[in-house]
Amino acid sequence: MSQAVAVRVDKKGRLTIPKRIRESANVKPGDRYFVQSEGSVLHCAKADENPFDFLARHAIEEYRKGRTFSIEEVAAELGVELEGE
């Protein structure tokens, strides 16, 4: 089940994850996490997870929300010319 709470960042830039979320996500002291930023949004996943699995899960979530782009749209945004065009 998804959980969301507001947390504060301390002077050293640290976030405190509430106990109920740590327990639900099985977060233990010493665990390592990948952190990815998209503007003001942060995504994190345990570092023992394959980063491609994390990215695939994120892509599936975006697809389900209807946030998809064609390869042509991405290429145009990045200024990349596709072969055969």
Image (spheres, rainbow, N blue to C red):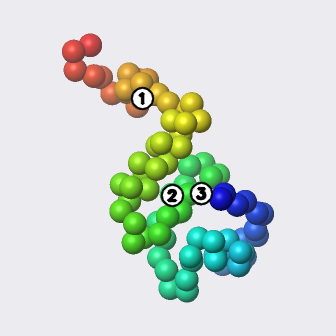
Residue 35 in picture, x, y percent from top left? 51, 63
Rendered view: 58 above or below 73: below
Q: Is residue 57 left or right of residue 27?
A: left
Tell which residue pokes out farthest to the front in this image: 1
Marks 2 and 3 in Cβ contact (< 8 Å): yes
Residue 65, numbered label: none
**How many circles with numbers are drawn on the protein?**
3
Residue 11, x across and y down, in percent = 71, 77
Confirm or deny contact between disc 1 and disc 2 (CB under 8 A).
no
Name the residue located 39 percent from the left edge and 72 percent from the top edge. 48
* Residue marked by disc 3: 42
68 w.r.t. 12: above or below: above
Residue at the spot of label 1: 74
Which residue in the protein does label 2 denote? 36
Q: Position of residue 29 (x, y in %)?
A: 55, 86
Q: Looking at the picture, which amino acid does disc 2 mark?
A: Gln
Image quadrant in which the C terminus is located? top left
Amino acid type, mark 3: Leu
- Residue at image position (49%, 48%) is 58
Which class describes the residues within 10 Å of circle 3: few (<14), some (14-19), or many (20+)? Answer: few
Q: Residues within 10 Å of mark 2 (few under 14, many from 20)?
A: few
Query: How far is disc 1 from disc 2 in space, using C-alphas?
Result: 20 Å
Is disc 1 surrounded by few (<14), some (14 to 19) or many (20+) residues within 10 Å?
few
Extreme residue in the top direction: 85
Distance, label 1 to label 3, CA atoms, is 22 Å
Residues marked 1 and 3 touching at CB (< 8 Å): no
In terms of sequence position, does the residue under pointer 2 or pointer 3 come before the other?
A: 2
Disc 1 residue type (three-letter):
Val
Task: Name the residue: 47% across, 28% down.
Answer: 69
Among the two numbered marks 1 and 3 on one chain, the one whose residue lies closer to the N terminus: 3
- Where, by quadrant of the figure, is residue 15 drawn? bottom right
